[in-house]
Amino acid sequence: MGELNGAKQLLAEAIGAEIAAVPEAARVGAFERWDSLAHMRLILALEEKIGRKLDPDEAVKIESLKDIAALLDRRS
Amino acid sequence: MMRAKGRPVLLQTDRFELRSVTPADASDRWLGWAKDPAVMGPLNLPARAMRREELAQHIASVDNNARYLVGIFDKASGTQIGFFMIDVEVMHRYAIFNVAIGDKNWWGRGVVNEARAALLDHFFQARGIEKAVGLPLARNFPALFNYKAQGWRHEGTLRGQCLSLTDGSRLDQYQFGMLRKDWQRLRAKGAPWAS
């Protein structure tokens, strides 16, 4: 899971905070600052980073930092 | 023959009053949402200028049996900020929930899940509904977030399910579901957006 920091950075930017404000356990529905608009910003930034649109079955599985990191890890 | 209207909805949450709208609620604000692509696009509805009479007629056509149109009103100001449209399949006791938050000042502030939690309680407890369904477009990421944060189950991805009413392309859709028993379990656990 080498991209955990990259995932943290993306989420930090999406919520408009410093990277230190993002807990490793951040999850959808369990981290207040991760709201619906932040989620939209996060997915759009993630797509930009990996250079393609997410497949719907990928997007629907994003629930945690680890899920974001896994997508970053898989980018070709 | 016109079907008799059912009981209107009237609920309170911490921040909002949820009530069945009436033709008198056909406001300039609502007409503004109808012609705003940022509000209508995620719902796959064309933004268009409506006349107040058209909107009032649309509201009047809702029967509070097979279809509900429930306004979300900010308690502090009394202003309407959005609405739910809920379609009920009476025979199979499920309801399809659609929502629009027209007032952009409220986007990202937890309106949908606070309001929907009260509506789920009400429809499961008082309207005989046993399953709630949500069908957001796959690219509607705020809606996707809200369903997941509230604990709905992703039941499937419907590929190319509908035609875009703005550019004619085929759009993917998700199906999310919430069974009454699962909602009760989430409530009992005090899960986020269910407590």
Image (spheres, grey):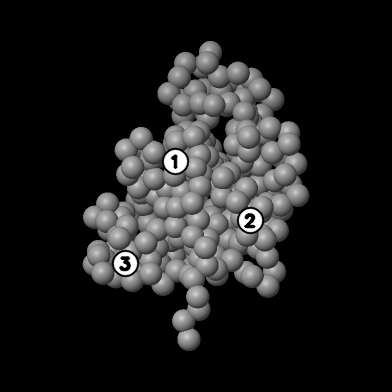
Crowding at mark 1 (Cα within 10 Å: few <14, some 14-19, many 20+): many
Q: Are marks 1 and 2 on the same chain?
A: yes
Q: Measuring 25% from the left and 65% from the top, which residue is drawn there?
A: B52
Q: Position of residue B132 (x, y in %)?
A: 64, 56
Residue B173 can be seen in this image? no
- The residue identified by callout 1 is B16
Q: Residue furthest top?
A: A20
Q: Quadrant of residue B136?
A: bottom right
What secondary structure is marked by label 2?
Answer: helix
Q: Position of residue B60 (x, y in %)?
A: 38, 69
Instruction: State which chain disc 2 sits on.
Output: B
Crowding at mark 2 (Cα within 10 Å: few <14, some 14-19, many 20+): few
Tell me how far mark 1 sits from mark 2, CA to CA: 20 Å
Q: Measuring 48% from the left and 86% from the top, which residue is drawn there?
A: B1
What secondary structure is marked by label 1?
Answer: strand
Three-letter code, disc 2 = Ala
